[in-house]
Amino acid sequence: MSSRFLPYDTISTDAVLSLDEDTVLSTTEVDFAFTVWQSFPERIVGYPARSHFWDSNKERWGYTSKWTNDYSMVLTGAAIYHRYYHYL
């Protein structure tokens, strides 16, 4: 279990940058994600995107990272989101 999403009082900025320890991003990529987030602060903006789908063989939802240009979720290994989400 991770304590990454606990509502820490020391987080005073609206934007939270969430990175896994093995994530490698350039400053250009971080800057771009932050710029996009500023336009959509109610959304999670990031790089490890996935698409969810119904797997009828397993009769449950799954997700894939196939290159489809049709994404429905962003993983938080490299993401920017509003600190509000720490309080849900």
Image (cartoon, grey):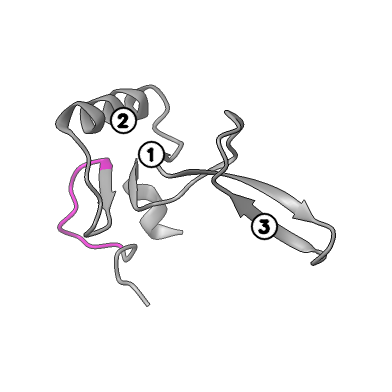
Q: CA distance from mark 2 to mark 1?
A: 6 Å
> Helix or strand or loop: what does disc 3 sit on?
strand
> Helix or strand or loop: what does disc 1 sit on?
strand
Q: On the rendered image, what quadrant is the N terminus found in?
A: bottom left
Q: Are marks 2 and 1 in contact (CB under 8 Å)?
A: yes
Residue span colored magenta: 7-15
Q: Earlier in the sequence, mark 2 or mark 3?
A: 2
12 vs 54, left or right, is left
Mark 2 Cα within 10 Å, few/some/many (few <14, many 20+)?
Answer: many
Q: Which residue is mark 1?
A: 46
Q: In the image, residue 18 lies at what x, y percent? A: 28, 51
Dividing the picture into quadrants, the one containing residue 46 is top left
30 vs 63, left or right, is left
Dividing the picture into quadrants, the one containing residue 3 is bottom left
Q: Earlier in the sequence, mark 1 or mark 3?
A: 1
User: Magenta stretch: dominant SS?
Assistant: loop
64 vs 37, left or right, is right
Front position in the image: 74 or 43: 74
The amino acid at mark 1 is: Gly
Q: Which residue is mark 3?
A: 62
Q: In the image, residue 58 lies at what x, y percent? A: 79, 67
The amino acid at mark 3 is: Gly
Query: Which mark is nearer the camera, 1 or 3?
Result: 3
8 vs 58, left or right, is left
Dividing the picture into quadrants, the one containing residue 82 is top left
The residue positioned farthest toward the bottom in the image shown: 1
Query: Which mark is nearer the camera, 2 or 3?
Result: 3
